[in-house]
Amino acid sequence: AAKPAVQAIIALPIVLPPTVLGFYLLILLGPEGGIGRWWVELTGSALTFSFSGLVIASCVYSLPFAVQPLMAAFESLDVRQLEAARTLGATPRDAFFSVALPQSKRGYLNAAVLSFAHTLGEFGVVLMVGGNIPGATRVVSIAIYDHVESLNYAAAHRLSALLLVLAFVILLALFVVNRRGQKA
């Protein structure tokens, strides 16, 4: 089981305002920040205001939505099956890949889908780390904001409806798959 301090750090993106998280990621990923400086030395380009930076920031923002299903999946593993694999000569690595991982596949699916769905409409972290660069870092949620700001509610409505339908379909598919998996 994870220590409470680690759990609290992982859960922080749930309770922090996205702009606060985005600000600190901007500092960390910026050319003068620890990770940002290393990235510039490695690649010659900055993480901030780039697609790569957006991906990293989105992963941090959605981390709790990935970790929770994974923790639940691993905590529900049948330890007896792992012990049986070890008794039959499996190394810890073999037992992990042949027993634990297959039994946890629903947790991986839930983690991936929930993280992706959670990131779809993110605004604060994306704007802080990626900015609003058309063709590079502008995402749908920021485009919606731009349309509302310019009083183009029809365009904002179209994009908002698209995100609403997409999020609903993603969650519906996840719930259907999970329900089928429970019956099997």
Image: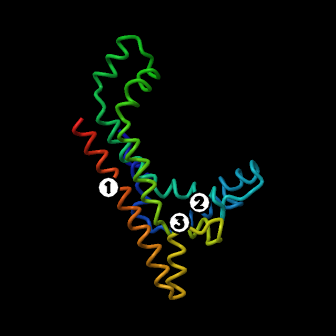
Residue placed under numbered mark 3 in the picture: 125
Between marks 2 and 3 in the image, the one whose residue lies nearer the viewer: 2
- Residue at 35% x, 38% y is 1
Q: Quadrant of residue 92?
A: top left
Distance (Cα) linking label 1 and label 3: 26 Å
Which label's residue is closer to the chain start, 2 or 1?
2
Q: Is residue 184 above or below residue 119?
A: above
Q: Quadrant of residue 97?
A: top left
Task: Please tell me whether mark 1 sits on a helix, a strand or a loop.
Answer: helix
Counting every numbered tag in the picture gives 3
Please say if the residues under marks 2 and 1 sit with CB atoms less than 8 Å apart.
no
Q: Nearer the viewer, residue 173 or 90?
A: 173
Q: Where in the figure is residue 145, as x and y percent of width and height?
A: 51, 78
Q: Where in the figure is residue 117, as x and y percent of width and height?
A: 42, 58
Please state which amino acid type lies under the numbered disc 2. Answer: Leu
Q: Where in the figure is residue 129, as x and y percent of width and height?
A: 60, 65
Between marks 2 and 1 in the image, the one whose residue lies nearer the viewer: 1
Between marks 1 and 3 in the image, the one whose residue lies nearer the viewer: 1
Which residue occupies the extreme left position in the image? 183
Residue placed under numbered mark 1 in the picture: 172
What scheme was used to colour the molecule? Answer: rainbow
Q: Which mark is residue 54?
A: 2
Please state which amino acid type lies under the numbered disc 1. Answer: Leu
Distance (Cα) linking label 2 and label 3: 8 Å
- Residue at 75% x, 50% y is 43
Q: Where in the figure is residue 160, as x and y percent of width and height?
A: 43, 73
Task: Decide: few, some or many residues near mark 2? Use Cα within 10 Å; few <14, some 14-19, many ≥20.
Answer: many
Q: Which mark is residue 68?
A: none
Which label's residue is closer to the chain start, 1 or 3?
3
Task: Please tell me whether mark 3 sits on a helix, a strand or a loop.
Answer: helix
Task: Please tell me whether mark 2 sits on a helix, a strand or a loop.
Answer: helix
Q: Quadrant of residue 138?
A: bottom right
